[in-house]
Image: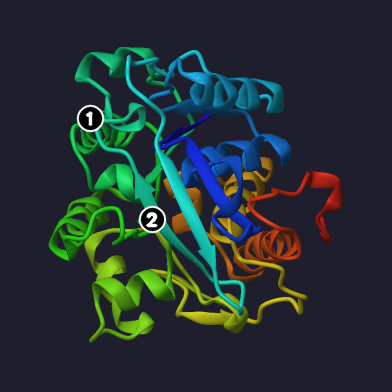
């Protein structure tokens, strides 16, 4: 069981100018929400730990997760509205996000909700803006502290400065997480936002010294840079792809990486520490191929296992 922690919300897209307004389409979304669905579609067994509203949006989010095979038995249902996020995609397919809503369901977790989360989970994934807003950030940290050494801890900062504009909040969250993280996935865009004076290689060295077992830096069309304490950083080229947009590509990459590790019995810290280069390359190639499929589709349409090219 892989527990995915964080937000489920609605992404609102502009479907065109109507003269005196916009035609909008609202779609289920949120980085951890996408990740949970991606894991389910790739054959893993995800459990979602995040606040789900009982409003019409929250009911749709819950119904979608359940239909995709995500376990909701530990997801709280607070009396709060669902967050809405507009996505403005530029000519290159790169999205910009604006949040509408505070005091919303994804933030409304309590320490008592941790009793819902199984202590024997194989892995716990955390990240995105629920690591940078309260009270959910403190609750998530408490879960990480409880599960460190019991579960593999995976972390993707997935920085959203439009939602939490205080850069220091993000860097403090990353600093707190590094000694407690087994698998860190971070984009070069996030690195630029948080550490503009550091190269990816310099950040990787810092993360490894802090105790991270596997560090993966995704760089869009430039591919991936990855390292462990035993394996020097190496580059893997990105698959060629006709990009529609990149919404959900990072979530797909992480879902595919975790699912691959799970299928191959590598979803534990000791296994990551002992990874050899061929095993790491195979995992990254699978994750990259899955992410490429998402880039060819509009929105966070995660691929299914049978769709992903593989050498397995």
| Identity of the residue furthest to the front in this view | 20
Q: Which residue is mark 1?
A: 139
- Crowding around mark 1 (Cα neighbors within 10 Å: few <14, some 14 to 19, many 20+) is many
Which of the labelled discs sits on residue 102, or is there none?
Answer: none
Q: State whether residue 311 is above or below residue 233.
A: above
Q: Position of residue 303 (x, y in %)?
A: 75, 49
Residue 64 placement, left or right of 48: right
Q: Residues within 10 Å of mark 2 (few under 14, many from 20)?
A: some
**First in sequence: mark 1 or mark 2?**
2
- Residue 34 visible in the shown view: yes
The residue tagged with tag 1: helix, strand or loop?
Answer: helix
Q: Which residue is mark 2?
A: 98
At horizontal 42% and vertical 75% (from top left) the residue drawn is: 188
The N terminus: image quadrant: top right
Quadrant containing the C terminus is bottom right
Q: Is residue 130 above or below residue 179?
A: above
The residue under the point 22% across, 43% down is: 133
From the image, state whether disc 1 or disc 2 is nearer to you. 2
Q: Residue at x 39, y 36 (%)?
A: 83
Point out residue 47 in the picture as x, y percentages from the top left corner: 52, 26
Residue depicted at x 41% and y 74%: 189
Q: Relative to 144, does residue 59 appear above or below in the rendering? A: above
Q: Are marks 1 and 2 in contact (CB under 8 Å)?
A: no
Task: State the SS at label 2.
Answer: strand
- Quadrant position of residue 29: top right
Say whether residue 182 is visible: no
The image quarter containing residue 153 is top left
- In this orientation, which residue lies closer to the viewer: 84 or 167? 84
Q: Is residue 13 above or below residue 108?
A: below
Residue 219 x/y as whole percent? 52, 77
Q: What is the image's colouring?
A: rainbow
The residue nearer to you, when weighing 34 against 237, is 34
């Amino acid at each position: 069981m892989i527990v995915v922690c964080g937000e489920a919300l609605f992404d609102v897209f502009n479907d065109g100018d109507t003269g005196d307004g916009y035609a909008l389409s609202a779609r289920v979304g949120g980085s951890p929400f996408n990740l949970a669905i991606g894991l389910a579609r790739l054959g893993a067994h995800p459990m979602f730990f995040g606040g789900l509203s009982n409003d019409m949006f929250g009911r749709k989010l819950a119904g979608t997760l359940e239909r995709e095979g995500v376990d909701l038995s530990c997801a709280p249902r607070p009396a709060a509205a669902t967050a809405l996020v507009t996505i403005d995609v530029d000519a290159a397919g790169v999205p910009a996000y604006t949040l509408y809503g505070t005091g919303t369901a994804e933030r409304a977790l309590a320490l008592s909700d941790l009793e819902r989360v199984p202590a024997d989970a194989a892995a716990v994934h955390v990240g995105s803006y629920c690591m940078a807003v309260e009270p959910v950030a403190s609750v998530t940290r408490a879960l990480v502290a409880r599960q460190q050494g019991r579960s593999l801890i995976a972390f993707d900062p997935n920085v959203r400065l439009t939602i939490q504009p205080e850069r220091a909040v993000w860097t403090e969250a990353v600093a707190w997480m590094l000694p407690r993280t087994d698998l860190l996935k971070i984009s070069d865009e996030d690195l630029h936002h948080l550490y503009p004076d550091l190269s990816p290689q310099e950040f990787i060295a810092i993360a490894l010294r802090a105790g991270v077992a596997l560090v993966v830096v995704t760089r869009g069309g430039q591919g991936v840079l990855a390292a462990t304490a035993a394996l020097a950083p190496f580059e893997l080229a990105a698959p060629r792809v006709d990009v529609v947009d990149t919404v959900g590509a990072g979530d797909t990459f992480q879902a595919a990486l975790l699912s691959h590790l799970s299928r191959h019995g590598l979803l534990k810290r000791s296994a990551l520490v002992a990874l050899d280069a061929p095993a790491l390359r195979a995992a990254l190639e699978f994750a990259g191929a899955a992410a490429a499929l998402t880039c060819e589709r509009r929105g966070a349409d995660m691929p299914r296992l049978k769709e992903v090219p593989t050498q397995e």
